Amino acid sequence: MGDPPVCRIMDYGKFKYEQAMKAKQARKNQTKIELKEMKFRPKIDVGDYTTKKKHIERFLSDGNKVKVTIMFRGREMAHPELGLNILEKLAAELVEKASVEAQPKLEGRNMHMLLTPVASRKDDVSASGKA
């Protein structure tokens, strides 16, 4: 005549607990990408530049995005190309570790650029090895 409907009697409390544990595990495994900011000045010296560049490299290796800001004061606004040169030099030196998500843009007295981390080659090799 037909197949009768089949249902399973289950412990709803246990079901809710298991769902909560799955959700908790999913939250634990997710990574939150933060936006870090590094501020430069147009007349930055070599030592300060390298120190800040190392901080940016550390942020990128942790998987965070980095917003690089050049702050102009007073007459420095007459030469925005100095800030642009610093940002382009930084992007060129970090080309292996970062990609430029937002090109340098002058807004008021600040110039901004956004860098995002590039997946490391080790990850690419292991991903292709599994496929």
Image (cartoon, rainbow, N blue to C red):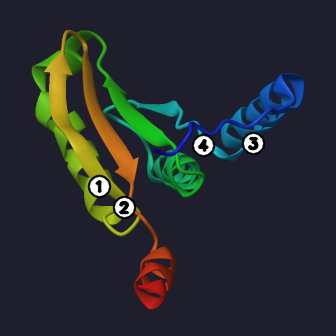
Q: Which mark is residue 25?
A: 3
Residue visible at 35% across and 35% down in the picture: 43
Task: Indicate the amino acid at tag 2.
Answer: Leu
Is 20 left or right of 96, judged from the image as shown? Answer: right
Give the alpha-carbon distance from disc 3 to disc 1, as whole Å: 31 Å
Give the alpha-carbon distance from disc 1 to disc 2, as whole Å: 8 Å
Q: Quadrant of the C terminus?
A: bottom left
Task: Indicate the amino acid at tag 1.
Answer: Ser
Residue furthest to the front in view is 1
Residue 42 in the image: above or below residue 117: above
Residue visible at 51% across and 43% down in the picture: 64
Q: Quadrant of the N terminus?
A: top left
Task: Indicate the amino acid at tag 3.
Answer: Gln
Label 4, on which residue? 31
Is 4 left or right of 94, judged from the image as shown? Answer: right
Label 2, on which residue? 94
